[in-house]
Image: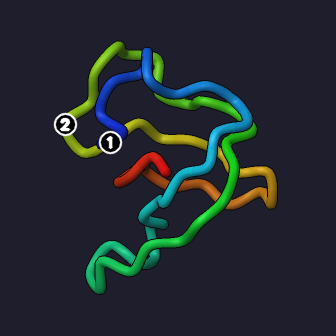
Amino acid sequence: MEGKRRADVRPGIAVMVELLEDKRSGRLTGGRVKDVLTSSPVHPHGIKVRLENGLIGRIKQII
């Protein structure tokens, strides 16, 4: 599932995110959602979240 709809994202779910520093390479990092940072209901590049380990990125895949 893609992470473009805020309604699909909630704290505790496992996701693959693209960190800001990995934007050019497209490398994905796995983790669990701690906070949802995007306020709009839909975002074309993915919902921005903070992971439990403190990293921030946009969701590319919900596991």
The reply, left or right, for residue 18 in relation to residue 35 is left
Identify the residue shown where x is 54% and y is 52%. 15
Q: Provide the residue designation for mark 1.
A: 1
Mark sitting on residue 61: none
Q: Residues within 10 Å of mark 2 (few under 14, many from 20)?
A: few
Percent x, y of residue 56: 60, 54
Identify the residue shown where x is 29% and y is 86%. 25
The reply, left or right, for residue 58 in relation to residue 11 is left
Percent x, y of residue 44: 19, 36
Q: Quadrant of residue 28?
A: bottom left
Identify the residue shown where x is 38% and y is 52%. 61
Mark sitting on residue 44: 2
Percent x, y of residue 36: 60, 30
Q: Nearer the viewer, residue 4 or 54?
A: 4
Q: Residue furthest left?
A: 44
Q: Nearer the viewer, residue 49 or 15?
A: 15
Compared to residue 24, the image places residue 4 above or below, namely: above
- Give the label, 1 or 2, closer to the camera: 1
Indicate the colouring scheme: rainbow
Q: Residue furthest right?
A: 53
Secondary structure type for disc 1: loop
Q: Residue furthest bottom?
A: 25
For the image shown, how many numbered marks are present on the structure? 2
Q: Quadrant of residue 3?
A: top left
Q: Amino acid at mark 1?
A: Met
Q: Nearer the viewer, residue 15 or 22?
A: 15
Compared to residue 28, the image places residue 42 above or below, namely: above
Q: Residues within 10 Å of mark 1 (few under 14, many from 20)?
A: few
The N terminus is located in which quarter? top left
Q: Mark 1 or mark 2, which has the lower sequence index? A: 1
